[in-house]
Image: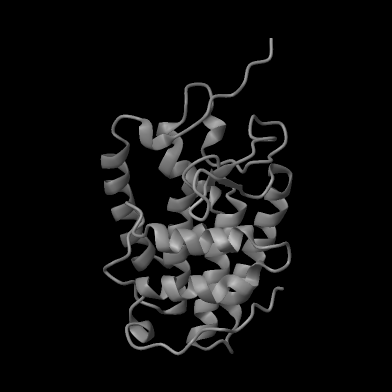
Amino acid sequence: MTTTPPPWQAHDIAGYDSAMTAGCSTLLAEIIADPARRKAILTDPRDLHRTLFASFTPSGHNEYAGTYRGTRGTTLAGRRMSSESQLEVGGQFEFCPPEEVPARMNLLLDHMQQWLRDASADNYGKLLGLSYTFCWFGKIHPFLDGNGHVQRAIFAAMATEFGFPLSARFAIHPRPYDRLLATALEIFTRAPANEENGELALVAEYLAFFLDGPFNAVRKHISSASPYD
């Protein structure tokens, strides 16, 4: 008899908040101090997801931690994901379909490395690189749960690689933003195909709030398009 794999909301499990508070505080310190830790996260975020969430997976479903949606031969092969809309009362919007996730993640990680290697990028170009990575990771939503934590860890690692100090306002856990940035991310996610990157500037304005250094001052308008359109 075929059974439906269970849903997964890790935050509903006892001890989740205290464990994630401690674990993510340690993780952020490691990201700031350890280049090897940053490289591992930016090369393949699945190990990080497994480390953070393996202890919170449902019994018999260890694959929920550290496995992309759309991975063949797993219970995640056909798992679709949607979220409550900030723009439409009672509405929902969907993230990338599972069959697209593995390839889109490979492409995103490749583009991220291009941003990191681009010696010609100025500070605002780097901010757009951060925004591009942050937005596309959110649109892809590669994991069944815990995407926000990995998304913020990647942001911290990439910002540190760029030489941008993180603001004291930033945290991996708990989520340091709410409806304003969530709305900007939804606008990006729901943009017509091949028009998503036109919304990067809006998200960049919010993400700059979590950076010190050159962004802890009055900023010029950010309007450059992504080179990966």
Quarter of the image with the N terminus is top right
- Residue 43 visible in image: no
On screen, residue 208 versus residue 189, left or right, reads left
Point out the residue furthest to the front here. Answer: 89
Q: In the picture shown, does residue 217 fall above or below 45?
A: below
- Residue at the spot 57% in from the left edge and 86% down from the top edge: 119
On screen, residue 107 versus residue 48, left or right, reads right
Figure label count: 0
- Residue 138 visible in image: yes
Residue 216: give x, y in percent of width and height.
32, 83
Quarter of the image with the C terminus is bottom right
Residue 205: give x, y in percent of width and height.
45, 76
Q: In the picture shown, does residue 213 fall above or below 136?
A: below
Name the colour scheme: one colour
| Residue 226, picture quadrant | bottom right
Residue 59: give x, y in percent of width and height.
47, 22
- Residue at the spot 51% in from the left edge and 84% down from the top edge: 222
- Residue at the spot 32% in from the left edge and 59% down from the top edge: 171
| Residue 152, picture quadrant | bottom left
Q: Nearer the viewer, residue 69 or 40?
A: 69
- Residue at the spot 48% in from the left edge and 69% down from the top edge: 158
Q: Nearer the viewer, residue 185 or 57?
A: 185
Point out the residue furthest to the top here. Answer: 1
Q: In the picture shown, does residue 134 fall above or below 50?
A: below
Q: Nearer the viewer, residue 20 or 169?
A: 169
On screen, residue 214 versus residue 148, left or right, reads left
